[in-house]
């Protein structure tokens, strides 16, 4: 008889400890966010093996923080991530990959050596790519997991904070319906800050809307209805655009479908720079040069300190 799934809203430390006792199970019974939380709270150094259909991920934890994610998803490699985000051309990527393979060195070393990326840009890109790899399993509702504790010491300088990863995953991946279902247990009740929280608020970067919810909870003025409303407001065009682009990069959504969804994101927020950028890039993929230039130029105006849109537009000419 399968055990009952852990209820996400209020897992206790004892429940989180119990979740890892078997060292293996299904994502239906113990969802990915609960596994992240359990390993982080226990400050474990381990490898979390995740399997869902044909997809595989091995997440390496060092004292409770993810520091590496090995994946069999082709679009999640560093080279594909750089090409998809417009930071590297297909030609430069292919050349760098061949050099890295022939010299048996990491791709990043070749990229900095050939001045395609600065060391600072490489570190930032590796961190961003790790974050995206860790977000994808939030979509996995079916699959299996296993925890291995006999692992060598981590050597990666990268580190992701689990509290922030959970907030980002909920905001970018989970649906409004799922969020409302998660707080249904407290309907018509007021929320407060826990006396013994699993993590401190200092470990989170909160948006202004999220901060208002926290302040209201501190003052005893926050109901589940206001949480749902704030989350809906915070889930603006930028959040939608990032989620849609992630689905496109992972080949979950084809270009035409992603383009349609991004247009809906622009209806939510016409001045969303990221939505304009991604719409422009998708038009370029689809061969619509005039439309691509228009959206990319619009993105460049909306984020004047970021040259990404300008560089992509130049590549069209």
Image (cartoon, rainbow, N blue to C red):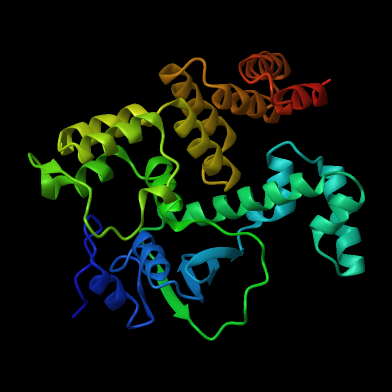
Left or right: 243 in relation to 100: left
In this rendering, the answer to whether 159 lies above or below 266 is below
Residue 168, horizontal then vertical, whole percent: 44, 45
Instruction: Please tell me which residue lies in front, 299 or 41.
Output: 41
Residue at point 75%, 51% (across, down)? 79
Where's the N terminus, which quadrant? bottom left
Residue 278, horizontal then vertical, whole percent: 60, 28
Residue at point 40%, 52% (across, down)? 166
Q: Say which quarter of the image contains residue 299.
A: top right
Instruction: Please tell me which residue lies in front, 79 or 226.
Output: 226
Residue 105: in sight, yes or no?
yes
Residue at point 47%, 68% (across, down)? 64
Number of numbered discs visible in the structure rendering? 0
Where's the C terminus, which quadrant? top right
Residue 2, horizontal then vertical, whole percent: 21, 77
Left or right: 114 in relation to 214: right
In this rendering, the answer to whether 141 lies above or below 182 is below
Residue 71, horizontal then vertical, whole percent: 60, 64
Left or right: 275 in relation to 34: right
Residue 55: in sight, yes or no?
no
Left or right: 222 in relation to 28: left
Q: Residue furthest bottom?
A: 150
In this rendering, the answer to whether 294 lies above or below 225 is above
In this rendering, the answer to whether 47 lies above or below 305 is below
Residue at point 87%, 56% (across, down)? 110
């Amino acid at each position: 008889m399968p055990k009952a799934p852990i209820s996400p809203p209020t897992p206790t430390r004892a429940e989180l400890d119990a979740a890892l006792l078997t060292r293996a199970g299904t994502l239906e019974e113990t969802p990915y966010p609960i596994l992240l939380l359990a390993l982080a709270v226990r400050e474990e150094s381990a490898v979390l093996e995740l399997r869902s259909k044909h997809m595989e991920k091995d997440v390496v934890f060092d004292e409770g923080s993810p520091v590496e994610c090995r994946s069999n998803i082709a679009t999640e490699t560093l080279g594909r991530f750089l090409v998809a985000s417009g930071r590297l051309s297909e030609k430069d990527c292919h050349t760098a990959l061949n050099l890295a393979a022939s010299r048996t060195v990491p791709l990043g070393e070749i990229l900095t050596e050939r001045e395609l990326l600065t060391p600072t840009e490489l570190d930032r890109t590796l961190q961003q790519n790790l974050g995206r790899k860790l977000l994808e399993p939030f979509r996995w509702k079916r699959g299996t997991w296993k925890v291995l504790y006999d692992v060598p010491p981590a050597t990666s300088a990268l580190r992701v904070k689990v509290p922030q990863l959970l907030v980002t995953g909920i905001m970018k991946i989970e649906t409004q319906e799922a969020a409302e279902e998660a707080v249904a247990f407290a309907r018509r009740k007021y929320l407060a800050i826990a006396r013994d929280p699993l993590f401190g608020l200092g470990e989170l970067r909160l948006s202004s809307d999220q901060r208002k919810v926290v302040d209201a909870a501190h003052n005893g003025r926050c109901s589940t209805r206001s949480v749902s409303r704030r989350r809906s407001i915070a889930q603006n065009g930028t959040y939608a655009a990032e989620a849609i682009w992630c689905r496109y990069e992972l080949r979950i959504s084809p270009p035409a479908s992603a383009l349609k969804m991004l247009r809906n994101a622009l209806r939510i927020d016409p001045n969303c720079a990221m939505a304009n950028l991604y719409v422009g890039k998708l038009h370029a993929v689809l061969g619509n040069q005039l439309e691509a230039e228009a959206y990319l130029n619009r993105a460049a105006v909306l984020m004047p300190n970021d040259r990404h849109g300008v560089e992509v537009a130049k590549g069209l000419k």
